[in-house]
Amino acid sequence: MTVPNSFTAALSPAERAGIGRDARSRASRSCHGWFEAGQDRFDPVGVIERQSAARVAELVPIRYGRMLESPFRFYRGAAAIMAADLGPTPNSGLRVQLCGDAHLLNFRLLASPERQLVFDINDFDETLPGPFEWDVKRLTASFAIAGRANGFSRKQQDAAVRTCVRAYRERMREFAGMRTLDIWYAQDNVERLREFMASSMDKEAQRRTARATAKARTRTGMQAFEKLTRTTAEGRRITPDPPLIIPLRDLLSGSAEEEKALQSVLDGYAPTLSSERRHLLRHYHVVDMARKVVGVGSVGTRCWIVLLRGRDDEDPLLLQAKEAQESVLSAQTGGDRYDNQGRRVVAGQRLIQTTSDIFLGWTHVLGFDGKERDFYVRQLRDWKGIVRPETMGPDLLCMFAQLCGASLARAHARSGDPIAIAAYLGGSDRFDRALTEFAQSYADQNERDFEALAAAVRTGRVSAQAG
């Protein structure tokens, strides 16, 4: 994937830095410091409804139910609303490959192919090239919203936001002085996390982080296999848990149709893997498949878990095939050049994630309803450590904000121009202060949008269901 940039390799570092400083004339750093919806702002519930129109109808009420659990949960499902808000605002023009949904819960511990834990971005459903600050704004607003959910004071919320932005700015400055290959090889592995813990955390925070790291190592495919499957007369099969998990056999009329559907998934997906990984995949065969409800914003998209067996029932592989729809950023950035949205997701992930799942690929499937859809495929739960912001105190939230800000800078430096971005940000805290104001004003808007969805449920405009 090529990210359009305002520089070429032929430009000198001084020329690239000049591009970054010149970008302040298009969008000053202080202009990012506020969000105020105009009188003609779009209907936020309408944005969500338009997304839902392309989703599984019976699952949409579950999406609304999850979004109404709290303003923070609402924010997780409202990437399309924020994209529409950011689109008309002044932007730097300094483009990177955006995550597109860079809230704090999309940063976590992951397993590298070398079986090392790394801290990185996890979700790329909305990835697309765009102005670097859009990701930073979505991330910082998530810390303000999480702080409010925890009952933190305004000062404590602001501290987390400022810490996040400062970590992004300072690490981007580091990358601006690094060799190109060193930027590409940079990663936030366990060793770097240990150094960070030793210098920045108190003993209790270090203990909690060590426990989280150890727990991430237990969140393996085998753990998911034990949790999601059961022994039947035919062998291990996925356990039904409707409406959250519905095996394919319960959605189709006959075994021949089920077998055809199972095989079609792998037939389209396998060619997108490298040759050695296709060879590895041939050691497995598909035995079961089920539709699964996942996340908050993704609820209603078609997501399948695929159970494959190697040597025997104790040699499983669980894959997740997740529907990839058009990015919420597409309307704001002029679209993308991919005819397969699954490929868009995979290409974006490979570009900005340090190291990706060995089974990451994409496919195009003709659905049971006769409609064609794009999917991306990856392993289900491979050493994933998921944070719980509701258990964090102010200091721990700040430390996590520092990790996320630095990690986002590393992702952006791989695909964009770290010299230009660092020059735009500068050495002062002007951008930090501006984003702190933005995060609070957008957290206010998020609460208003949350209430708008709640009102839509009360009036019967939309239906919500717990799940």
Image (tube, rainbow, N blue to C red):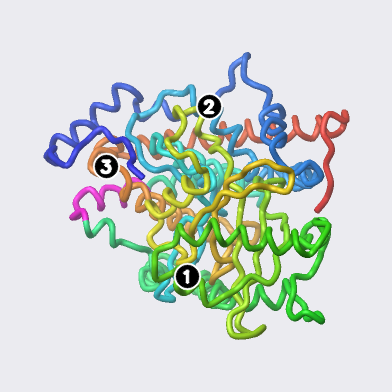
Q: Position of residue 146 (x, y in %)?
A: 61, 49
In this view, the mark in front (1 or 2): 1
Q: Which of the marked residues, 1 or 3, is nearer the chain's N terminus?
A: 1
Marks 1/3: CA distance?
27 Å
Which residue is located at x 45 percent, y 54 percent? 404
Q: In terms of secondary structure, what is the magenta stretch mainly?
A: helix
How many residues crowd around disc 1 within 10 Å: few (fewer than 14), some, or many (20 or more)?
many
How many residues crowd around disc 3 within 10 Å: few (fewer than 14), some, or many (20 or more)?
many
- Residue 293 seen in render: yes
Which residue is located at x 65 percent, y 43 percent? 77
Q: Position of residue 413 (x, y in %)?
A: 31, 48
Q: Which mark is residue 111?
A: 1
Marks 2/3: CA distance?
27 Å
Which residue position holds label 3? Answer: 417
Kind of residue sitting beneath label 2: Phe
Task: Determine the residue located farthest toward the front in the rendered image.
Answer: 256
In this view, the mark in front (2 or 3): 3
143 vs 104, nearest the viewer: 104
Q: Which of the marked residues, 2 or 3, is nearer the chain's N terminus?
A: 2
Q: Which of the marked residues, 1 or 2, is nearer the chain's N terminus?
A: 2
